[in-house]
Amino acid sequence: MFVPIILYINTRTNEYFIQIKGLAKANIEADELEVIKVHLKVMFLNFDFYPLKKINFSSKTKNNKKTTKKRSSKTISLRKIINVLGTFRVKQFQAEIDSGDCIFNSKLYPVFALFNFYNNTQLSANFEGRNNVLLSIENRPIRLIKSFINN
């Protein structure tokens, strides 16, 4: 309940993962044969699987019976969505942006400097064509449960 869940995205080093600290970690990696590969570590076991690989269902027979399912009309309120999003904590955020327009980049430079002064982020505009994002978000299951209960 108190174990942190971390989402990490780094486009500079091509690291993308979601981790439940101490229990499981799922890395998304590039693959030569398939487009992407998901490397899953659960406790002491390692697994690789390809989510975009075509699955062959030709050996199974399909029943063409039509079944009607009754849909429940449960809607999630906007307040509940906002409360759940409020439980996430941004641990690290860095962005390096080049829009391709040098005039626009020069206008972004003082805005980013002011934003960096008041917030714990690192935003920068460059003139060299680099576009990178580093984002680390953390949440705990207990905070998610509390947000549903308190609403």
Image (tube, helix red, strand yellow):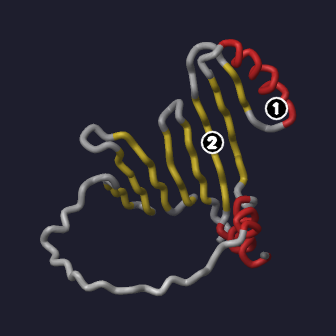
Between label 1 and label 2, give the one nearer the viewer.
1
How many numbered markers are drawn?
2
Residue 149 percent coordinates (x, y): 75, 78
- Classify 105 as above or below 87: above
Mark 1–mark 2 CB contact (< 8 Å): no
User: If the image is split into quadrants, where does the C terminus sit?
Assistant: bottom right
The residue lying at 38 percent from left, 51 percent from top is 38
Indicate left or right for 42 with 99 as reference.
left
Q: Which mark is residue 115?
A: 1
Indicate left or right for 129 with 27 as reference.
right
Q: Which mark is residue 135?
A: 2
User: Alpha-carbon neighbours of circle 1 within 10 Å: few (<14), some, or many (≥20)?
Assistant: some
User: Alpha-carbon neighbours of circle 2 within 10 Å: few (<14), some, or many (≥20)?
Assistant: some
Q: Amino acid at mark 2?
A: Leu
Secondary structure beneath disc 2? strand
Q: Earlier in the sequence, mark 1 or mark 2?
A: 1
- Residue 19 or residue 43, whichever sits in front: 19
- Residue 128 or residue 117, whichever sits in front: 128
Secondary structure beneath disc 1? helix
- Classify 50 as above or below 80: above
The residue lying at 69 percent from left, 21 percent from top is 125
Residue reaching furthest to the left: 59
Q: Quadrant of residue 75?
A: bottom right
- Residue 139 or residue 123, whichever sits in front: 123
Q: Quadrant of residue 78?
A: bottom right
Indicate left or right for 40 with 81 as reference.
left
Residue 47 percent coordinates (x, y): 34, 57
Residue 68 percent coordinates (x, y): 39, 86
Q: Amino acid at mark 1?
A: Phe
User: If the image is split into quadrants, where does the N terminus sit?
Assistant: bottom right
The residue lying at 67 percent from left, 59 percent from top is 139
